[in-house]
Amino acid sequence: MKIAWATDIHLHFVKETRVAEFCSRVLESRAEALLIGGDIAEAIDLEEWLRFLDQHLERPIYFVLGNHDYYRGDISTVRNRMRGLKSRRLHWLPHTGLVRLTPSTALVGHGGWGDARLGEFLGSPVILNDYLRIEDLRGSTQEKRLPDVHGNKERLQKRLGKLGDDAAATLRPVLSEAARDFSDVIVLTHVPPFREACWHEGKISDENWLPGFTCKAMGDMLLEVVSAHPNCNVRVLCGHTHGSGEARILPNLHVRTGGAEYGDPRFELLDL
């Protein structure tokens, strides 16, 4: 079975003709399904672009959400809309649960979140647009200006940590089931779950950028579950950094970080 994997395609920055070309390339590859690792669009046009992909590809699309998918919206509203998608081919993985791709391979997923636990968050000068353009996070800082974000970073850090914890708690039982019943598991996520997978321009991100670009809660959960199932090979597919790289975390835990460029949606072909 061949499947296509794309991440950080940011379709709201792409002309419709280019998106149609992307779909044509997926069809020409003869992939039987498409995996999308988040940052598909923004909250206001996310469903529109998912429907576009559905209509042009006419095959299963399994996806998770990235931080940009919540821009100009709030987290609970966006997620409720994903649960209500009316298509037999569009599958938001946290809602769908375990997917049997082949007799030996399962797919599970959750977007995760940059949970501000790796690197230096409180003293870092880095302020992500997330903290101003996602309603829930903007509410954590109470204001819309950068000085106000810096002044409320402890409160924001707690909120980010909870989002990471919730992601790990949601995925844990589904991953545990998959690791128990299958010899190979693909975990589709958005945020790199380990420092070693936080690639940008050919190297690991520094202490200032790690807090927003890694999900330690997800990494800790993966280590625990995968260690308990040594006969199961787990492959994590993530993105978020727009830099590609690979990391072998355990003998049976391999992480691939997908590269991306704004305005140029691309995919990789995986042979299961």
Image (spheres, grey):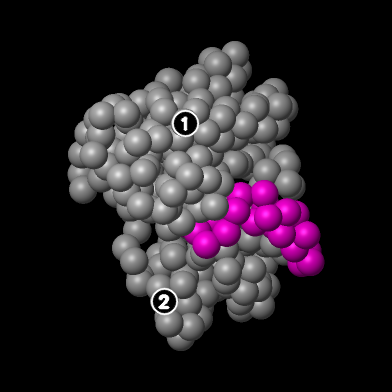
- Asked if residue 71 lies in the magenta stretch, the reply is yes
Q: Answer yes or no: is residue 254 visible.
A: no
Q: Quadrant of residue 232?
A: top right
Q: Quadrant of residue 174?
A: top right
- Label 2: how many residues lie within 10 Å, few (<14), some (14-19) or many (20+)? some
- Residue 108's place in the image compared with 28, above or below, is above
The residue depicted at 58 percent of the width and 69 percent of the height is 44
- Residue 213's place in the image compared with 12, above or below, is above
> Furthest-bottom residue in view?
17
The reply to whether callout 1 and callout 2 are in contact (CB within 8 Å) is no
Name the residue nearer the viewer: 164 or 265.
164
The residue under label 2 is which amino acid type? Val
* Residue ID for mark 1: 155
Q: Element under label 1?
A: helix
The residue depicted at 25 percent of the width and 34 percent of the height is 124
The image shows residue 255 at horizontal and vertical percentages of: 42, 35
Real-space CA distance between mark 1 and mark 2, rounded to the nearest whole angstrom: 35 Å
Q: Is residue 175 left or right of residue 142?
A: right
- Residue 3's place in the image compared with 209, above or below, is below
Which mark, by number, is residue 14?
2
Which mark, by number, is residue 114?
none
